[in-house]
Amino acid sequence: MTAILSPVLIIGASSDIGRALAHEYARRGASLVLAARRVERLDPDLRDLLHRHGATARAVELDILDPAEREAFLVGLNEVPGTVVSVVGLLGDQKAAEADPEAARMIMETNYVAPALLLSALANRMSERGAGTIIGISSVAGDRGRATNYVYGSAKAGFTAFLSGLRNRLAGRGVQVMTVKPGFVATRMTRGLKLSKALTASPDQVAKVIVEAQLAGRTVIYILGRWRLIMLVIRLLPEPIFMRMKI
Amino acid sequence: MTVMARPAEVGPRAVVSAPELAPASIVKPKRIYGARPMMLSGWGRFPRVSCRVLEARGEEEVIATIAENSSLIARGAGRSYGDAALNRGATLVMTASNRILDFNSGSGLLTCEAGVTLAEIADIFVPRGWFPLVTPGTKFVTVGGAIASDVHGKNHHRDGCFGAHLAYLDLALADGRTLRCSPTENADLFRATQGGMGLTGVILRAAFRLRAIETDLVRQETIRAENLAESMARLKEASIANYSVAWIDCLARGGRLGRSLVYRGEHVALDDLPKERKGRPYLPRGGQMRSVPFDFPGFTLNRFTVAAFNELYYARGRPGTALVPLDPYFYPLDAIAHWNRIYGRAGFVQHQSVLPEEASRHGLETMLSLISARDAGSLLAVLKLCGAEGAGPLSFPMRGFTLALDFPGTTANLSLLLELDAIVADHGGRLYLAKDARAGIAVMERGYPRLRDFARLRDRFDPKRHFASVQSERLGL
């Protein structure tokens, strides 16, 4: 693939990764549709994209957890996007999710059910057209369920499997489906945490790697190569040993 | 629009609480971005203070953060040298508020959020033929910081400070309101915020004019001046140029006291482009920065190394003209990231003063004699003739000569600086707050006669002194 298909729809556009992606695509000449729960907050970003890159961008309100809003959103899209990126996610609180089914459901819906259903509908339209790219931001946490965040991890695992299946279904239909497993990312929200520098990417780095991988026609990517090795080891650990590791 | 009302409900801001492995998202709000305590300092790396650091993107988050903290100071890129952008309880980092909001390509009026840096502005607008009208010696300052320090550049004698080119600014106040401030609306607050060191409120946005340029080159003329009298005379003559500044050898003594290289600069017009650049007025910007990878040992800069550097620098400063690209002309040190590390772990202290023109000769002679007598050479000593005073009661420049020095933060140097302060005050001069980390209340009060106006204004808008910094507490502002 040699060009980015416009418009690029970014779902979860007010996040740091969403913003970085918007700039990366705009820099390369794409037009943008930004979806976020509070659309009025995107107004300065639309202006910024215009004045920095001369990019055409518009914002659309979407609470992805609300089925009615998802439906309205799909109806309101006046063209099938060329590229869709879902940056939707919620880590939540593992302890709370163990105690409170509602908290667990929220994590599962946000990381799996809602984005999968929305991407599914968009995939059908892209398939009809015979062109497009779907990019899902999943997580290394979906590679194996860990004691410390398995509710989140299980939802991401579901999302990863969904994207994998979608990729297989649409192979040969002109639709590229790419799964992204970022690992640690230095966003505003992780700033207080002690993350290993060697394993942490910046949002700009994430955006650049994603767009370049899209252009190269990749299928499943980690942002920093060393995560691939780490997750390989974690997946291969025999269960009895893994159970003793409190990770 | 005069007053932008505070939103009825200062709502959920943070989008998710995802600490790790999670891309951020559009889902239900959980909490404010985590405050984190960390050791913080200005660019001089002295002093270092443990501060609770917060971040805000956009007006709503700024207003909420002001409401939740009883004492707070805004911080831009952390390029003021001392303790002006430090508050132990709440230091609000504004760099995530960095969106370009509007640009009028006819008038050059740029509107942006306070966290945009002059580096970003240059990267975006130089290729379109625009450059900041006033820029300090580093491009890594934010617009908010440039206003709060009312920065000046090599063209102060002609164009004044950064604040002189503002059309308006939007200021978040202690009481939760946001006020538009301009020469005609809330003019007293507008003036006081220029050079007000963030003590009037948090600057959210600003609109200011850029300068139209035709190329990315500056014609620089270098003139040697053998002593102080000559340096001052050459600088005065250079006032007809757009840009003028002198590098001064402050280890020179006797008849060579105050010898300098005086630089004059003008933007190069399209017609004057050299042949090899015809048709390419703007070269691509960017490129790798070199970096100082570690703290130099404290002994690196001493009388002998500085003297050797100065000797070399002076000798290499060939009189004549050269075409110099914008970046190395305006920002020679920006090419080396973390250049502040050459001063070692102790950090360094800056001393920038301005003396009234009639007192400048005597005052400068006294200061330079003292410095060379102590062998306390400053590597980067800069002399410049400033123009008229700015609008802000705490704005630094006034008509007269300004001398900028930096020294390693040793005890001996700190006591030397106190002596320099006294010379400044005795000559009716003042110190630059953006560079100050250690001056006393007395020199401040003597240097800024409009300090009372500033305090009265704060009594009206911030009676509880919601906005405060380590510096404002030290100086009793």
Image (cartoon, rainbow, N blue to C red):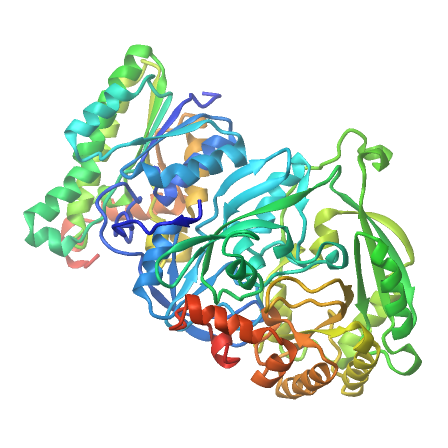
Q: How many numbered circles are shown?
A: 0
Give the residue at the far front of this rendering.
B184
Position of the N terminus of chain B, as image quadrant, is top left
- Residue pictured at 77% horizontal, 43% vertical: B217
B433 relative position to B400: left or right: left
Q: Is residue A72 above or below residue B91?
A: above
- Residue pictured at 38% horizontal, 52% vertical: A199
A222 relative position to B321: left or right: left
- Residue pictured at 59% horizontal, 47% vertical: B208
Residue A11 percent across, percent down from the top left: 31, 33
- Residue pictured at 15% horizontal, 29% vertical: A67
Foreground pick, A203 / B135: B135
Q: Is residue B220 above or below residue B273?
A: below
Q: Tell me if I can see residue A1 in this picture.
A: yes
Q: Is residue B401 above or below residue A160?
A: below
Residue B337 percent across, percent down from the top left: 61, 58
A148 relative position to B296: left or right: left
Residue A121 percent across, percent down from the top left: 22, 21
A58 relative position to B439: left or right: left
Residue A136 percent across, percent down from the top left: 30, 33
Foreground pick, B318 / A173: B318
Q: Is residue B357 above or below residue B331?
A: below
Foreground pick, A185 / A240: A185
Q: Tell me if I can see residue B86 in this picture.
A: no
To which quarter of the image does residue B357 belong?
bottom right
